[in-house]
Amino acid sequence: MELTDVILSRRSIRSFTEKEIPSDILEKVLEAGRVAPSSQNKQCWRFVVVQNEEIRKKLAFKSGFIGKVNFFIKNAPVIIVACADPSRSVHLNEQDYYLVDTAIAFQQMILTAWNYGIGSCWLAAFNEKKVKEILQIPDKIRIVTLSPFGYPKERPSLYDKALKTFAGSKKRLPLEKIVCYDKWEL
């Protein structure tokens, strides 16, 4: 696929087949994150790749803010947890760049996966403390996001359809609402 096609066609996937992700493809996905740019090349990100079924189930049923809201991730063959060490990052303009740097790396991974037909769903509704407990992540490390990775089912689940409707996933602001030239005019 052309890069623009990958970017424009990518969507959140919440229904996965049982097909495993080949290790060479998973390595390409991880490599895409590794080579991402970061502020002062600090590379503060770290990734936990969860393939063990029992651990995936724990994350699915015990990591959500509200009950079992993340239950759908149990069916993905891989869950990747994007972490960062803030002490290995830059703080400029009153901003912690570990969030930006890790997000860039993870987005490169998500787009690379999509190029190979592997779907994902960027999650924010997780309980960081519970995820840290399950994966034995040290206190000083922050979890920026996590995502299931897997091959999309041909037919999305009812849950998937409901969430897309609730989130308004297809609604995007037009360029004139988000872009101005030479000065702020929004």
Image (spheres, grey):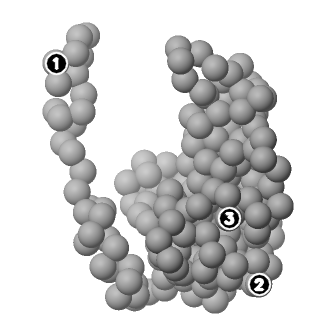
**Residue 185 horizontal side relative to residue 143, left or right:** left
**Residue 8 horizontal side relative to residue 30, left or right:** left
| Number of disc labels | 3
Q: How far apart are marks 3 and 2 (CA)?
A: 15 Å
**Callout 1: few (<14), some (14-19), or many (20+) C-alpha neighbours within 10 Å?**
few
Please name the amino acid that badge 2 sits on.
Answer: Glu
In-front residue for pair 44/37: 44
Tell me if residue 75 comes above or below residue 134 in the rendering: below
| Residue at image location 61% in from the left, 48% down from the top | 144
| Residue at image location 22% in from the left, 57% down from the top | 171
Which residue is the site of mark 2? 54
Specify the quadrant of the image occupied by residue 84.
top right
Dot 1 falls on a residue whose secondary structure is: loop
Disc assigned to residue 130:
3
Specify the quadrant of the image occupied by residue 131.
bottom right
| Residue at image location 44% in from the left, 52% down from the top | 7
Earlier-in-chain disc, 2 versus 1 = 2
| Residue at image location 16% in from the left, 18% down from the top | 185
Please name the amino acid that badge 3 sits on.
Answer: Lys
Which residue is the site of mark 1? 185
